[in-house]
Amino acid sequence: MARRGGRGRTRGLLLGAIADDLTGATDLCNTLVAGGMRTVQVIGAPREDAALPDADAVVVALKSRTVPPARAVRESRAALAWLRRGGARQIFFKYCSTFDSTPRGNIGPVADALLDDLGGALTIACPAFPTNGRTVYKGHLFVGDVLLENSGMRTHPLTPMRESDLVAVLGAQTPHPVGLVEHATVRRGAAAIRRALEGLRAAGVRHAVVDAVADRDLAAIGRACADLPLVTGGSGVAMGLPANFRESGLLAAGGEAAALPPASGYAAVIAGSCAPATLGQIERMAASCPAFFVDAEALAARRRVAAGALAWAGPRLAGGPVLIYASAPPARVRRIQKRLGAGKAGAMIERCLARIARGLVDKGVGRLIVAGGETAGAVVSALGVNALRIGAEVDPGVPWTMSTGRPRLHLALKSGNFGGPDFFTRAFEVLP
């Protein structure tokens, strides 16, 4: 066993995690901090010789959700190797609670590669996050009261989800058998789930989709996974993992895992997500705060949109939060994608928003909200942020964080689907 440090904590990494996008990584960190684990988020695949942070959990945030499967596998395996060298006792592969993927991957290929490297025989797949309306029943993923295929994810510009049966979705991404642990078993608790997983493993199943419709289901699933080398899912299923380390004497109770130093500087919001939740948040904030629309068609026409946005923001920052957004309804997104191609259009907008973020920080912004996983990845890269300390939760799945380098920035990196209608304005009110 590793040496014990201050306050009864164990020195050494307990949980190593790999997330397929930035905001998803932050969402997972938030869950682990709520469970009492000191958690650091690392941005991008670390160098082989990079030292691991002093933390109970380290989450490596990749940008691998929509890249070619071979690249996603390569980057994920490199992150795994680094986490294992740091002594991680269990590995978590985190993806979106709406199972964002394509028929080729990347969830199945990455999970298979990680299992191979860990020598595991079986893992689970559970994207459920009931607090945010994501539930799995009889293997089908629901968003609120509707099936995934009937939700706003059907028109997602990069990963349109038109199948709700996760056994079928995952089965198309892996050559290995996919099974199901139904809710009738889950509601009987951790021991029943564990027996069901053992039965599936004996039958040659490698991936087990697990139903969950409430937080108590996630807690039970987490306990049932205590001995699995690899767990995969949304951040919700990680809810039960800290208790496993605590029960084994490796993690102390209590502590101040979410404490961050006070924030300073101007406040701004940058939004690139086109998710319905983000569109509603933009509409709410724009009704009371200065707002600037980054027009993709103006970008395509090679206009100096970033410079215009920064010139607009400069005299307004002292008056309170400003909003700069490129988010648009599906019809407008389809129009620009048809003209430029989905990949080119997305990359063009991300580069522009990243330049704007860098300019805002140069103008004194120290409190920044970024909406959208792809946008957040581009922004933190442009800002040179390599790691984040995780603070208190604003809304389910979205905490405030603080960069570990200079300049010191407080960042809320929000998945497009997360947060209440008033998230953008309320988040600044709860920041210390």
Image (cartoon, helix red, strand yellow):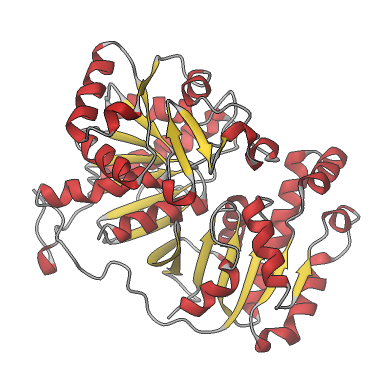
Please identify the quarter of the rendering in which residue 195 is found.
top left
Percent of width and height locating residue 76? 44, 37
Task: Say above or below: 175 vs 378.
Answer: above
Q: Is residue 338 visible?
A: yes
Percent of width and height locating residue 295? 83, 59
Task: Using the image as rendered, state which of residue 2 and residue 133 is in the foreground.
Answer: 133
Percent of width and height locating residue 185? 27, 27
Q: Check the image and name the residue furthest to the top.
A: 203
Task: Say above or below: 188 vs 178.
Answer: below
Task: Using the image as rendered, state which of residue 285 and residue 94 is in the foreground.
Answer: 285
Image quarter of the C terminus: bottom left
Please identify the quarter of the rendering in which residue 356 is found.
bottom right
Q: Is residue 107 left or right of residue 191?
A: right
Q: Residue at x 59, y 74 (%)?
A: 425
Task: Say above or below: 368 vs 170.
Answer: below
Q: Residue at x 54, y 33 (%)?
A: 71
Q: Is residue 142 left or right of residue 288?
A: left
